[in-house]
Image (tube, rainbow, N blue to C red):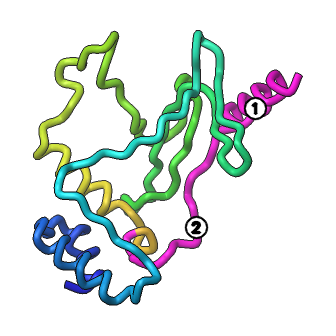
């Protein structure tokens, strides 16, 4: 299965593990030893954790090219009149913007909040709706040249103030 067909299969939800292995093998033949594809049979989850608050004080990563925004956050998704993604706003948790708030609590004091995690069928439906709401340039395999994400003025100021405290 060519890589483009594999990607389309992922988008539609019609990819089986055998197809992924087959496509990986074919892709490795096409790459002429310039790229590498690895595959493990066991499931894996990769995460990146960035501390944004500790003891009620803002924290951030300040490595060159990897600066993060401190503080607790909320993301608001704004849709255009056709129901397509117009803009996401990354805001402080207590800020309020037009749009649907995307981040919802699922744990409290180390326990899962009852009813906070939707059923798998509901998650699949939500994912399909979210994909359908993406403008065509973000559903393509080609790079998109726009980025409809806005960082709130509050988060930018918090980042500036946090850096000023660290630098003294």
Circle 2 is placed at which residue position? 146
Crowding at mark 1 (Cα within 10 Å: few <14, some 14-19, many 20+): few
Q: Which element type, helix, strand or loop, lies under badge 1?
A: helix
Q: Which mark is residue 157?
A: 1
Q: Is residue 146 above or below residue 119?
A: below
The image quarter containing residue 67 is: top right
Crowding at mark 2 (Cα within 10 Å: few <14, some 14-19, many 20+): few
Q: Which residues are magenta?
A: 139-168
Instruction: Identify the mark nearer the N-term, 2 or 1.
Output: 2
- Kindly identify the residue that appears in the image at 18 percent across and 24 percent down: 115
**Foreground: 122 or 49?**
49
Residue 24: image location, x then y, percent: 25, 76
Residue 118: image location, x then y, percent: 18, 35
- Kindly identify the residue that appears in the image at 82 percent across and 22 percent down: 165
Is residue 32 left or right of 150 when viewed as pictured? Answer: left
Q: Quadrant of the N terminus?
A: bottom left
Residue 51: image location, x then y, percent: 55, 28
Q: Which element type, helix, strand or loop, lies under badge 2?
A: loop
Is residue 54 left or right of 156 when viewed as pictured? Answer: left
Residue 103: image location, x then y, percent: 40, 34
Q: Quadrant of the C terminus?
A: top right
Q: Which mark is residue 38?
A: none
Separation of marks 2 and 1 at Cα, in angstroms: 24 Å
Q: Is residue 35 above or below residue 90?
A: below
């Amino acid at each position: 299965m060519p890589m483009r067909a594999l990607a389309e299969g992922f988008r539609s939800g019609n990819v089986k593990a055998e197809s992924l292995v087959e496509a990986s093998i074919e892709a490795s033949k096409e790459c002429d030893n310039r790229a590498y594809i690895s595959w493990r049979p066991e499931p894996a989850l990769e995460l990146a954790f960035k501390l944004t608050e500790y003891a009620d004080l803002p924290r951030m990563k300040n490595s060159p090219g990897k600066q993060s925004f401190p503080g607790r956050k909320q993301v608001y998704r704004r849709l255009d009149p056709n129901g397509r993604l117009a803009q996401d706003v990354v805001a402080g948790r207590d800020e309020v913007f037009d749009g649907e708030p995307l981040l919802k609590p699922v744990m409290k004091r180390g326990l899962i909040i009852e009813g906070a995690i939707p059923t798998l069928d509901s998650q699949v439906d939500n994912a399909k709706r979210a994909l359908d709401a993406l403008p065509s340039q973000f559903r393509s395999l080609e790079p998109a040249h726009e980025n409809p994400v806005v960082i709130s003025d509050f988060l930018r100021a918090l980042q500036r103030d946090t850096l000023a405290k660290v630098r003294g």
